[in-house]
Image (cartoon, coloured by chain):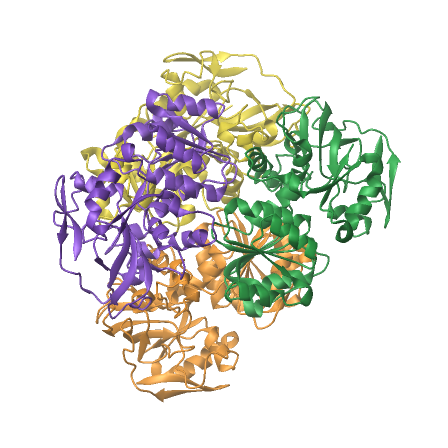
Chain colours: A green, B orange, C purple, D yellow
Amino acid sequence: MKALVYLAKGKKSLDERPKPEIAAPTDAIVKITRTTICGTDLHILKGDLASCKPGRILGHEGVGIVESVGAAVTVFKPGDHVLISCVSACGRCPYCRKQMYSHCTTGGWILGNTIDGTQAEFVRIPHADNSLYPIPKGADEEALVMLSDILPTGFECGVLNGKIEPGSTVAIVGAGPIGLATLLTAQFYSPAEIIMIDLDENRLEVAKRFGATSTVNSTDGKAAEAVMKMTGDRGVDTAIEAVGIPATFELCEKIVTAGGTIANIGVHGVKVDLHLERLWDHNISITTRLVDTVTIPMLFRTVASGKIDPALLITHRFKLDRILEAYETFGNAAKTKALKVIIEA
Amino acid sequence: MKALVYLAKGKKSLDERPKPEIAAPTDAIVKITRTTICGTDLHILKGDLASCKPGRILGHEGVGIVESVGAAVTVFKPGDHVLISCVSACGRCPYCRKQMYSHCTTGGWILGNTIDGTQAEFVRIPHADNSLYPIPKGADEEALVMLSDILPTGFECGVLNGKIEPGSTVAIVGAGPIGLATLLTAQFYSPAEIIMIDLDENRLEVAKRFGATSTVNSTDGKAAEAVMKMTGDRGVDTAIEAVGIPATFELCEKIVTAGGTIANIGVHGVKVDLHLERLWDHNISITTRLVDTVTIPMLFRTVASGKIDPALLITHRFKLDRILEAYETFGNAAKTKALKVIIEA
Amino acid sequence: MKALVYLAKGKKSLDERPKPEIAAPTDAIVKITRTTICGTDLHILKGDLASCKPGRILGHEGVGIVESVGAAVTVFKPGDHVLISCVSACGRCPYCRKQMYSHCTTGGWILGNTIDGTQAEFVRIPHADNSLYPIPKGADEEALVMLSDILPTGFECGVLNGKIEPGSTVAIVGAGPIGLATLLTAQFYSPAEIIMIDLDENRLEVAKRFGATSTVNSTDGKAAEAVMKMTGDRGVDTAIEAVGIPATFELCEKIVTAGGTIANIGVHGVKVDLHLERLWDHNISITTRLVDTVTIPMLFRTVASGKIDPALLITHRFKLDRILEAYETFGNAAKTKALKVIIEA
Amino acid sequence: MKALVYLAKGKKSLDERPKPEIAAPTDAIVKITRTTICGTDLHILKGDLASCKPGRILGHEGVGIVESVGAAVTVFKPGDHVLISCVSACGRCPYCRKQMYSHCTTGGWILGNTIDGTQAEFVRIPHADNSLYPIPKGADEEALVMLSDILPTGFECGVLNGKIEPGSTVAIVGAGPIGLATLLTAQFYSPAEIIMIDLDENRLEVAKRFGATSTVNSTDGKAAEAVMKMTGDRGVDTAIEAVGIPATFELCEKIVTAGGTIANIGVHGVKVDLHLERLWDHNISITTRLVDTVTIPMLFRTVASGKIDPALLITHRFKLDRILEAYETFGNAAKTKALKVIIEA
């Protein structure tokens, strides 16, 4: 089968690889119909993730059709249309039992990382019963690819951890795909203000279209001042970090109000300065989270009832045999204005 | 009246000062019967707190008897025995309305800071109705001085923010009076393990007597390794910082388990390193808090029912005219083994 | 001044009464600009409420302008435009300290009940600092009358107690003004389905316009069957009782799913049957609540940001001297299609 | 093998039955070492539970040693010492995913109810990975039998649902084994008062020994008055129903304070009167729950750390071949003073 393989730092190729097979009774083999590329895939290609070794098929998102199942799989059968969670969950370890699937002792984020992933014609899904979700008949399957990772990530790590509530004031730092997914799901809770902060004017325009009540272009290094002015020097109830560098996290520290929350989504490569000399008496919370995808069923219902349209995030489409071009497009978002690119397998 | 006055960096004296008077209809004048000295008072004397100006009467803890009340005070009348909260609360501003008294727009921590405090024969208490608490007949008033600040601080900033629950594993970094108050109140929730960490062997002995299940002397710089070993490399559910320096906060970062909480109590003077490159996917919470004293009524009930004995924290007693000696004793705790010193006015 | 006075069971009149005066230093006198009539006022007129004695000026909702304040009022001054909460709160008793203003030991629902109310040219507001709310310049003051009682009641007793969340399924039993206020505020949390149940086809039409995803006319006594069919025999996550009779509460018992919540808003005059023989193992919660109006500040922000339009609830307008006609219109809602009627004073 | 079999209303016998076999790949066969009898077993014998058919081996509690496992069982292997949960959980259905194991679509309470149970030499455990718990070496296995059902039931349905907190006031109606298990686990949260109510003076004596701060013998029908007097007419924050009849539930309605909680544990056979005409404005919660046993891991840790001694509940011991005598003893608790009887298999 065709598959996108990580070869070495900076190198990938579209290769022919053997079709995966059931390896454990809880496995399923899924024929991929749609997958996508994540910012994390770009990180892997830069050589940033030691856990992902050369030779790995990338990809941890997608929808498809169950091809075969192991003897212990009871929820799914061949022919079922399924959504693949980016996180595999055994459902029985201490972490899974408290819905912290991200830290499943034999799962977590392994797809396209420590085992082969979804940017291929077929993928093996471990712990299939707890890691796949049935797609209802008639659903827009392409749009549901957004439920594999990006929407639950924005919702769980940003919106839920950020304790957004009706009438509250929110700032989202970073208007990339994750920041925009956060923006879309934040509106489930009817905050009064959502201030979107980014360097890219195009993305800020998109943010406005997606529901941001105001935007701040942080190119001038004065985003904190702008937010404090907008909020009457009060700051925001929730500051969401959706970039992953010290400057953006420290911006959140500057704009969070007393009693507020900083919800980190960004994948950080270096430490940040935490200004406890100013924040120790500020009664704030800071949260970090690798997505658990525990809200996928809830997100399914919000999509089905039209509370959110995940297809808004899709800007480009490619066939699997042109996935290298898809990577090119996704990797040059400033120029291509790409948000999420769909790969049809 | 006699009063302990902050004169200048490093200088204090026991002076004669005019008795305070009702300045607003919501004020009360309280005759102090017992007060105490807080670690924060030592910080002020070092010149660390710009908000507290020379000439200020120090002290923000104590019990006493109401001497007179303003026209708008309805809960208290002269002769009532009262506990003084270290935090004054108007009860009507947006912060007070969500029980965040620490940030009351006309109150908060002002006693012995921006207005004269309790280390005197009398004190003026603003917003008396919401800042004093009636002492039931027959209570041990001296022990209740611990409810002005130290017990609610340990309980709110450490125990509640740290989400301690039955069977959980807790580490408290710092076995000074605040750390020990946290240790005492942590036991309200029956954690399985409470590991106490400090440099001072005497304080660790006290911690064992107060209910710590194990102790770590961190003199050798290997406390993190010791805690990880004790917890089977899992770390602790709750790590409580009760010192206020980078090294102890960063120790908390090392020992908190995935899904756990770091609850900061310490007053920090400089920034700390937050290792998001390791913690971004660790699903943790970090909390900061200036005590709101909103749990004083709850703490009263735990004292009345014998769930906690605040008198355990009291090691020395002095008359007000020997308060300079009390400061000496409290300031040399390593030698004197002082925890809390009671001043009888 | 003119005032609507409850005379005896079934009797009321528009009388001339003395203008109220400051009686306590925490009082304010408010000149009413707009008030309204509540279903509870009709109950009083039927003689259902023993607490409300003949001679009482009715009304517990409204907006106005502060005329004078007592010596201890610090938040408001003459000339301020204010919203009146239906619940008076001292801000200092044990109930107020936990934001349960409804049970304030010297307040709670007293206006137009145990003290004179708002259906008059002026009203005395006890505990003014905690019972009035400033109206921002330029706000639609008439619409804000809905924040005195009906919107916080629907939101606190129905939506918050009912734990509505994104994607959940909700049924609201009763499409009168309170049920419709619940419907409007339920949408803050983006539930997937809101099923509205009533006997009155007009009100069900209004409900659809206000955002109900489906409606059930319960005239045939088969509402439970209809809801179970709509939900694939699962029932609803949240069933909200907004009528106040046994039949409607018991309908909620029939349609709540395992793990769900019944949130009671209705004012009940007689006991209901609780079918514990069926519900003991159903893992449900049942809540009751007299509104605390603690969410008024949050509701102000949702109105200011356009998340809700309270004016939708207003169907009729009358001058104060025609208030008897207003009562007539409001009391015959089936015919007049009245929801809330505004009285201009 | 020997097994206690339910024959017909009022009839049981100790029979020879075939040893169970693995029927699904997720099954385990467990050799029982210790089991016990539950009040529910007595209900079944009275013919009260239609779901349990004649011919059924009773029992849903116990510890044992894994004899064999199906192909999909990964957590356990033959020879492992295990605790059996009274509730079987697949870990993958919508209910299990929100930790509501009691309503697992292919599990829940089935042992000794719809499939053969634990009062036998061997038992087949479906969904073994999520329904068994490893017993640490050196643990008191007999005492752990209390973690199969009675302690999690008291803790989840009574203590957690009842939101007991430090300093709160609790009443437990019913001092049978479940009420006493609730009493033991309530103390994890350090309530100030626990009032135990029962008709049996012996059980009230036991309750005092187990930590009740006061007791009320309700024989005179004046328990409500007694509790109101004890609480200064305030009532209790948490009222726990641990009997299952209308009189005891209605007692809870009378003694719960405004803002409090009634947590139902009792298995009810008939409806109760819910006095909403008095409670509609009382801001209370009422909860029902079939135990989920989701707290078994937490309870393990409280036992291991000595926060609770489950062995306190064990009063009698019998060999399996004398189980009829054990039933006799357990069924005549008023005379035998039996709480829990251990059956050694």
Where residue B121 appears, as percent x and y from the top left, is: 31, 80
Q: Please state which of residues C224 and D36 is positioned toward the viewer in this rendering.
A: C224
In the rendered image, which quarter is residue B126 located in?
bottom left
Q: Is residue A149 above or below residue D89?
A: below
Q: Position of residue D68 (x, y in %)?
A: 64, 23
The vertical placement of C338 against D55, above or below, is: below
Depicted D104 relative to depicted B34: above or below: above
Q: What residue do we see at 45% from left, 59% from top?
A: B156
| Residue D29, above or below C64 | above
In the rendered image, residue D305, in percent from the top left (x then y), is placed at 51, 47
Q: Is residue D93 left or right of residue C20?
A: right
Tag count = 0
x, y percent for residue C19: 16, 61
**Residue D20 versus residue C116: which sits nearer the camera?**
C116
* Residue A290 can be seen in this image: yes
Quadrant in which residue D203 is drawn: top left
Left or right, B169 with respect to A52, comes to left
Q: In which quadrant of the rendered view does residue C289 lie?
A: top left
Q: Is residue D266 visible?
A: no
Q: Nearer the viewer, residue A320 or A99?
A: A320
Q: Which image quarter is the C terminus of chain C in?
A: bottom left
Location of the N terminus of chain C (image quadrant): bottom left
